[in-house]
C-alpha cells in the first residue's frame, strides 16, 4: 500500500538533488569535486546588503508575520527599478507582488492559471521546474524546441492548432537557462503579438536579467507594446546580488494575473521575512557598482572557459548573458554518457543537456559559479584524465 498521491508519484527525482547526492558520496570517498553543475553564485552577497539585513533584524516589529503581498518598501523599490532600468511604469499596489524566490512564484503561477488537462507551452530545453509544476497541477505541457539555428528562440508558427486551443500559459526565459541565449526587444514584440492573437498569457522568467556582458542589456518583456495586457515577468535578486539563500523575488505586470496569484499565495504561505524584503529593497535602490563588478568576474571566467573548452575540442559560443555556457557534446557520445565519463574520471560535475528537456540532448551545461582557478583545474583534469577521444 502506498500513501503517496499519483500526482507526486509521476514526478521524477529533482535533477540537482540527485547531483548533490552523487556529489556527497564522492566527497565522502575522498574525491576532490569541482562542481560546475549548479548555478549557485560563489561570490559573496555585497556587504552593504548584509549590513542592512542585520540592521533590520534589530527591530522587533520586523520579526512578525509579513504581508503576503510584500512590504511597501520592497514593492516600491521594484517599481523604481523597472522605471530606471527599462522605462516601464508599474503600480506597486497592483502590478508588483513579492515572492519567496522566483521559483516559488513560477510554481504557484501555473496552478493559478491552468485547470487539470490544460496545456502549458514550455521552452525545450528549460528550467525543470516549468514541467514539474505543470505536472503537479495535473496539467499537460507542450515542448517548444529551442535550436541553435533559430537563436534558441521558439518557433511559434510550429505549435499545432489543437495545442494552442488548449493552452492557458506560455513560459519564456531570457537570458536563458540552460542555453544562455539572449534576445532583443523585437522578439518580445513578436511574442506579445502571438499571445494577444491566441489569448494565451505569457510568463517571462527574467532571473538572469542583470547578468550581462559588454554592451548587451537584457530587455524586459514589459517594454513591448501591450505587454501588460497579457504578460507577467518574474525577477529574482538571487543572481544579481548573490542572494540565493535569501529567497526573495517578485512578479510584475498584468494586474489580473498578479491578483489571482496573490489569492493562491495568501492561502499557502505568509510571505517572505520582512528583514529580507527590506534588505532586497536596499539592494535595488543602492549603488549598483557591485553588479558591474560581479559581471566582469563572470565575463573573465566565461572567456577563459570558452578557450579551455576549445582546447579539448569543444566549440562553445561565448554568451552575452547568464553565467552558463551551453556547449555541444563531443561526437559519439550522448549528453549523459559524456558528463558521466567526466564525473567518474575527473571529479568534475557538468549537467547533461537532456536533463532540461529532449531538445537539450547533444549539449551539456557549464556553470561559472566557481573561482577561475577551479575552472582552469577542471579543464586540466579533463585533458589529462578523460579516457575518451574528444574530436
Image: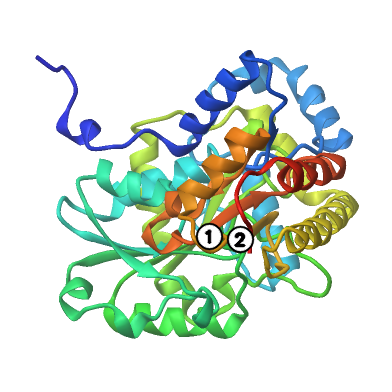
Quarter of the image where one finds residue 307: bottom right
- In the drawing, what numbered circle is on residue 326? 2
The residue drawn where x is 19% and y is 80% is 161
Callout in the foreground (2, 1): 1
Say which residue label 1 marks.
363
Q: 36 or 213, which is in the foreground? A: 36
**92 to the left or right of 368:** left
First in sequence: mark 2 vs mark 1: 2
Judge by depth and name the residue closer to the eye, 269 or 135: 135
Res. 38 visible in picture: no
Q: Residue at x 15, y 32 (%)?
A: 6
> Measured along the vertical axis of the image, is residue 226 above or below residue 341?
below
Q: Tell me if residue 48 comes above or below residue 230 in the rendering.
A: above
The quadrant the N terminus occupies is: top left
The answer to whether the residue labelled 2 contacts the one labelled 1, judged by CB atoms less than 8 Å apart, is: yes
Residue furthest to the left in view is 1
Find numbered disc 2 in the image and state the secondary structure of the residue it sits on: strand
Residues 253 and 340: in front is 340
Query: Relative to the observer, which residue lies in front, 287 or 174?
Result: 174
Left or right? Give the position of 198 relative to 165.
Answer: right
Tell whether 135 sits left or right of 15: left
Residue occupying image coordinates x 42% and y 30%: 269
Q: Residue at x 71, y 40 (%)?
A: 385
Task: Mark yes or no: residue 5 visible.
Answer: yes
Q: Position of residue 53 (x, y in %)?
A: 77, 28
Q: CA distance from mark 2 to mark 1?
A: 7 Å
In this rendering, is residue 196 above or below 332?
A: below
Where in the figure is residue 8, as x and y percent of width and height?
24, 32
Q: Position of residue 32 (x, y in %)?
A: 72, 25
Amino acid at each position: 500500500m502506498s500513501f503517496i498521491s499519483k500526482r507526486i508519484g509521476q514526478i521524477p527525482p529533482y535533477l540537482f538533488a540527485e547531483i548533490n547526492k552523487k556529489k556527497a558520496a564522492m566527497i565522502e570517498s575522498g574525491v576532490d569535486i569541482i562542481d560546475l553543475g549548479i548555478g549557485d553564485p560563489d561570490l559573496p552577497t555585497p556587504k552593504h546588503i548584509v549590513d542592512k539585513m542585520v540592521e533590520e533584524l534589530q527591530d522587533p516589529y520586523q520579526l512578525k508575520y509579513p504581508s503576503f503581498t510584500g512590504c511597501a518598501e520592497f514593492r516600491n523599490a521594484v517599481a523604481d527599478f523597472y522605471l530606471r532600468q527599462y522605462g516601464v511604469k508599474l503600480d506597486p499596489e497592483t502590478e508588483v507582488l513579492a515572492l519567496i524566490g522566483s521559483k516559488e512564484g513560477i510554481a504557484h503561477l501555473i496552478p493559478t492559471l491552468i485547470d487539470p488537462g490544460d496545456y502549458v507551452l514550455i521552452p525545450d530545453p528549460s528550467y525543470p521546474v516549468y514541467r514539474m509544476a505543470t505536472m503537479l497541477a495535473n496539467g499537460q505541457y507542450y515542448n517548444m524546441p529551442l535550436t541553435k539555428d533559430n537563436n534558441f528562440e521558439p518557433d511559434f508558427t510550429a505549435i499545432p492548432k489543437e495545442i494552442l486551443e488548449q493552452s492557458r500559459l506560455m513560459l519564456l526565459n531570457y537570458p536563458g537557462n540552460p542555453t544562455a541565449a539572449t534576445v532583443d526587444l523585437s522578439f518580445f514584440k513578436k511574442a506579445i503579438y502571438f499571445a494577444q492573437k491566441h489569448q494565451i498569457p505569457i510568463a517571462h522568467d527574467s532571473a538572469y536579467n542583470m547578468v550581462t556582458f559588454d554592451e548587451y542589456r537584457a530587455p524586459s518583456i514589459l517594454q513591448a507594446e501591450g505587454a501588460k495586457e497579457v504578460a507577467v515577468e518574474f525577477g529574482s535578486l538571487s543572481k544579481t546580488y548573490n542572494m540565493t539563500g535569501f529567497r526573495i523575488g517578485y512578479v510584475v505586470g498584468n494586474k489580473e494575473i498578479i491578483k489571482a496569484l496573490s489569492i493562491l499565495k495568501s492561502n499557502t504561505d505568509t510571505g517572505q521575512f520582512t528583514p529580507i524584503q527590506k534588505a532586497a529593497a536596499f539592494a535595488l535602490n543602492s549603488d549598483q557598482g557591485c553588479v558591474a563588478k560581479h559581471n566582469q568576474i563572470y565575463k573573465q571566467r566565461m572567456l577563459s572557459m570558452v578557450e579551455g573548452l576549445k582546447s579539448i575540442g569543444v566549440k562553445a559560443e561565448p554568451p552575452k548573458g547568464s553565467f552558463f555556457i551551453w556547449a555541444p557534446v563531443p561526437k559519439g557520445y550522448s549528453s549523459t554518457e559524456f558528463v558521466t565519463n567526466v564525473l567518474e574520471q575527473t571529479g568534475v560535475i557538468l549537467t547533461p543537456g537532456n536533463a532540461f528537456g529532449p531538445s537539450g540532448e547533444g549539449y551539456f551545461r557549464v556553470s561559472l559559479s566557481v573561482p577561475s582557478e577551479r575552472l582552469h583545474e577542471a579543464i586540466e583534469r579533463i585533458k589529462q584524465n578523460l579516457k575518451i577521444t574528444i574530436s
